[in-house]
Amino acid sequence: MIFEWGWRGKGETRCNAIAAGFMAKLVVRTKGLPAEVIHLKPGINRLGRSARNDFQIDHDSISRFHAELELRDDGLFVRDLDSSNGTFVNGEPVNEARLDSGQILQLGDVCMEVRDAPEPMATDQPMCENHPDIAAILVCKQCHRTFCGACVHVLRLEGGRYHRLCPSCSGHCESLAELRQNPKARLKVSDLIRRFFKRPPPPRPYVE
């Protein structure tokens, strides 16, 4: 028998969350543990031994707050939370990494197969400053550099909110997608893209 876990938000059951299209999931493949499927929600998903996590994994090799996975439109990313026994992708230790379908995510001694992870978005938006093969989804309001979801530092605030900080200057990072959806911000996004590619603005006509 395979057990399925799904995120339960306010007024939302596991079935509703899955039906809403939260397709990325982890399949537990560890001897001694029941076969379980963890359905991830968009945004931050915390995994660990504590019941305060989004998904509790009761195993001696798992830290209380072991790792967090961020599910975004452009991919699935894992970040180790200074765990005791480490986080691994296909056997390689990682602090932060992108996850693709078919890879094995290992937390301590617990192995999970990644399934239905989002593919990178094929757009004309800037690429990540640190990962040139990954499209950027965030931009720093201070230094105007662009990053993927795995690069930025996530600061947890009260009330379950998150503040994303630039890895270069610690400035506040905003979503490029949200800026594009805001008509008042479209010009600003174009300015950021020009700065990223170092394209000078067109010269202004001389007026006496």
Image (cartoon, rainbow, N blue to C red):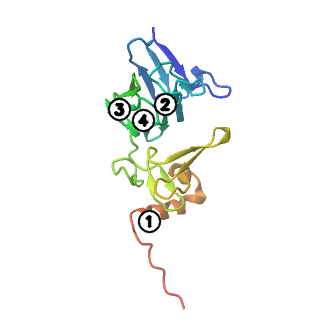
How far apart in space, not on screen, are marks 2 and 3 (Cα)? 14 Å
Q: In screen coordinates, is 135 left or right of 3? A: left
Up the image or down, 197 lies above or below 201; here it is above
- Check disc 2 and report the residue beneath it: 66
Q: Are marks 4 and 1 in contact (CB under 8 Å)?
A: no
Q: Is residue 101 left or right of residue 5?
A: left
Considering every residue shown, the one lying at the far front of the view is: 84
Q: Residue at x 43, y 50 (%)?
A: 136
Tell me the distance, in whole angstroms, between the alpha carbons under discs 4 and 2: 23 Å
Instruction: Give the quadrant of the N terminus.
Output: top left
Q: Which residue is mark 1?
A: 195
Q: Relative to 170, say whether 24 is above or below.
A: above
Identify the element where label 1 is drawn. Answer: helix
For residue 129, above or below residue 99: below
SS at circle 3: strand
In-front residue for pair 176/95: 95
4 vs 2, front mark: 2
Q: Tell me if I can see residue 4 in this picture.
A: yes
Image-based side of 147 in relation to 54, left or right: left
Q: What is the C-alpha distance between the residues marked 1 and 2?
A: 38 Å
What residue type is disc 2 on? His
Secondary structure beneath label 4 = loop
For residue 51, which quarter of the picture? top right
Amino acid type, callout 3: Val
Counting residues from the start of the chain, the first of labels 4 and 3 encountered is 3
**Tag 4 residue:** 118
12 or 33, which lies in front? Answer: 33
Residue bearing the label numbered 3: 89
